[in-house]
Amino acid sequence: IRFTFASRLLKEKGIEVFIKSIEHFLLNFKHKNKIEFIICGEFINDELIWKKENEFINHIKNFSKVIKYYGKLNDLNDIFKKSSAIVLPTFYGEGIPKILCESLACGIPIITTNQRGCRELIDGNKNGLMCKSKDYKDLAKQFNNFLNFNDKEINTMSKNCIDFANKHFSISEVSKAHEKIYKTILF
């Protein structure tokens, strides 16, 4: 099982929470041999507790058997193919994160926070899991919860992701939503 963080490496996007959750998971849960974590995204100097990218790389080297760091990638197709779930423990004040929409459209379950723009993407536990904001222990617990799903449940989640994306992100659905908004504004 591969959990992937794919975003700019900003504190508010939850990269520090992600790293701490990995450390907590490895110390407190049993499934250590069944899991790998992937990190890809642009490192922003002076943004994190690790001020430079080499400090960050040196820190995660302690977990080199379970964490793979790819840096900034222009094409995420290979990452999506490798991922079991896309994880974004964000507390960034944004709209709907594009990475989560892309993940759902690719049939990859998501694990994200109860943050505006993210919580709207979780349909119960049908297409992903939700963790508490800024809570690395709860995120580690969600990793463990995901690992307890069997293959049939994960396949169903994957199908639910695609169904959710088709229902909410298709051009026709987005156009209908825009039309509805325009009518309320103009009339």
Image: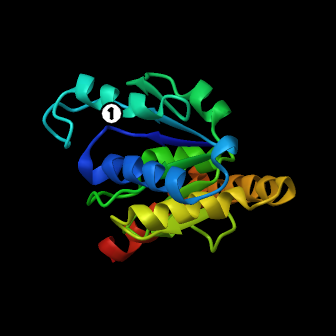
- What residue lies at 33% left-to-right and 64% top-to-bottom? 134
Q: Quadrant of residue 8 in the image?
A: top left
Mark 1, residue position: 59
Left or right, 139 with respect to 33, comes to left
Q: Residues within 10 Å of mark 1 (few under 14, many from 20)?
A: few
Question: Residue at the right extreme?
Answer: 152
Query: Vertical placement of 115 versus 187: above or below?
Result: above
Q: Quadrant of residue 52 in the image?
A: top left
- What residue lies at 28% left-to-right and 57% top-to-bottom? 92
- What residue lies at 69% left-to-right and 56% top-to-bottom? 147
Left or right, 37 with respect to 45, comes to right
Question: Residue at the left extreme?
Answer: 46
Query: Vertical placement of 88 versus 182: above or below?
Result: above
Task: Decide if residue 161 is in sight here.
Answer: yes
100 or 86: nearer the viewer: 86
Query: Vertical placement of 76 versus 5: above or below?
Result: above
Residue 118, horizontal then vertical, whole percent: 44, 63
On-image quarter of the N terminus? top right
Task: Decide if residue 1 is in sight here.
Answer: no
Q: Quadrant of residue 96 in the image?
A: bottom left
Question: Residue at the front extreme?
Answer: 27
On-image quarter of the C terminus? bottom left
Residue 121, horizontal then vertical, whole percent: 53, 63
